Amino acid sequence: MTASGPVKLKPGDTIGILGGGQLGRMLAMAAARLGLRCQVFSPDPDSPAFDVVQNAICAEYADVEALELFANDVDVVTYEFENVPSATAMVLAARRPVLPAYKILETTQDRLIEKDFVSKLGIGTADYADVTSIARLHAAIARIGLPAVIKTRRFGYDGKGQAIIRDGDDVDQVWEDLGTKSAILEAFVPFEREISVIAARSATGEVECFDVTENEHRDHILKFSRAPAAISDALAAQARAIAEKIASALDYVGVLAVEMFVVPGNGAPTVLVNEIAPRVHNSGHWTLDGASISQFEQHIRAIAGWPLGKPVRHGDVTMTNLIGDDILSYQQWLTVPGATVHLYGKGVPRPGRKMGHVTEVTPARKP
């Protein structure tokens, strides 16, 4: 298999996963059920994905020699997080197919480029502005108004690298605390609810979307996901159509998540896109136990060149993240009817760290 040729894996072939966190762990487990092997590349010796694969490389992403050894042992490369260094992806793409295509990272790793991309598709977002200096920040606030959210353009997640600016705040201090000269200011969105769509796209352009998920955050970290979202069928169809449009415009192969806000509209609510995550996503964890196919298997199928599955939800599903010391209550969850416990093997809990999750499925009543 060449770096540029079409991917068509067979059972026994090997998928290389960049990143060794819980998403890599669950991808490897999904691949194993389909008879596919995985090798994980991660600089963290305590990576939980190392526990479920036979072969792994623990090295820095800038280690070209280690990357070449990794490429020699795999048939296709994917990643479990979007902040893979572009140089790493380029080294691998010269040797093996990298899916989703590494050039997509150039769009999704930069919040400003991502917002411009979505806007050019005619899809609504919060009003935003490029901020490169304190003077530009004051000008952006004068145009957009307050409250507003300032974010670093790159490398932010779970609330890191961002702050809300309200009337009366010391704007200069907020800018200094952010510690960057590359930021984006976004208008604060008075949303009714937060939702996401997990979409899978194959190399041949087939797209399958899971049911729209409603998300609830605590301290900027996802705490609960519920499927289906408590929105109208028309709005759910609009959200899925947006995700499909984005996936197709990116020529995407694999699973991605599109996070959106539901906002009041003229007569009926509408949606605004918040962020794109070019990978399997926390808000799709409910699919492991709540649907006929999980987001992880769907991603493996897509990058392997296999047919996508048709997701069928088994009932009403709630996913609860076990964050930090929440993990200490895992035994209580084991006694809850209809609950399935997933522990990530991360060792000592830390505040804000995702240690596991629980899915609860209430089967749909037959008419």
Image: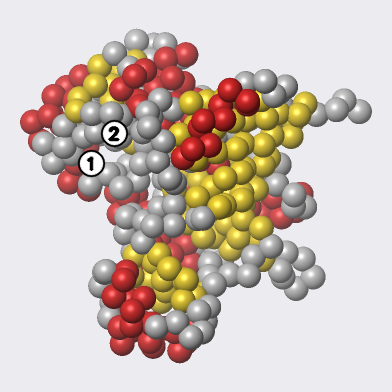
Hey, what amino acid is under mark 2? Leu
At horizontal 46% and vertical 21% (from top left) the residue drawn is 30
The quarter holding residue 134 reads bottom left
Q: Is residue 216 above or below residue 89?
A: below
Residue 57 appears at what percent x and percent y? 20, 25
Compared across the picture, whether 239 is left or right of 94 comes to right
At horizontal 76% and vertical 29% (from top left) the residue drawn is 362
Hey, what amino acid is under mark 1? Ala
Which quarter of the image is occupied by the N terminus? Answer: top left
Instruction: Note whether residue 257 is visible.
Output: yes
Q: Earlier in the sequence, mark 1 or mark 2?
A: 2
Q: Is residue 257 above or below residue 339?
A: below
Compared across the picture, whether 329 is left or right of 47 comes to right
Is residue 204 or residue 335 the one in the foreground?
335
Residue under label 2, please give it.
Answer: 18
Q: In this view, does 142 lie above or below 272?
A: below
- Whether pointer 1 and pointer 2 mark residues with C-beta atoms closer than 8 Å, the reply is yes
Is residue 164 or residue 181 the one in the foreground?
164
Compared across the picture, whether 201 is left or right of 4 comes to right
Which quarter of the image is occupied by the C terminus? Answer: top right
Residue under label 1, please give it.
Answer: 89
At mark 2, the secondary structure is strand
Q: How is the image coloured?
A: secondary structure
Residue 107 appears at what percent x and percent y? 35, 56
Give the spatial CA distance, label 1 vs label 2: 9 Å
At mark 1, the secondary structure is helix
Q: What is the total number of numbered labels drawn onto the structure image?
A: 2
Residue 263 appears at what percent x and percent y? 67, 66
Residue 88 appears at what percent x and percent y? 19, 41
- As drawn, the residue found furthest toward the right would be 367
Q: Crowding near pointer 1: few (<14 within 10 Å), some, many (20+)?
A: many
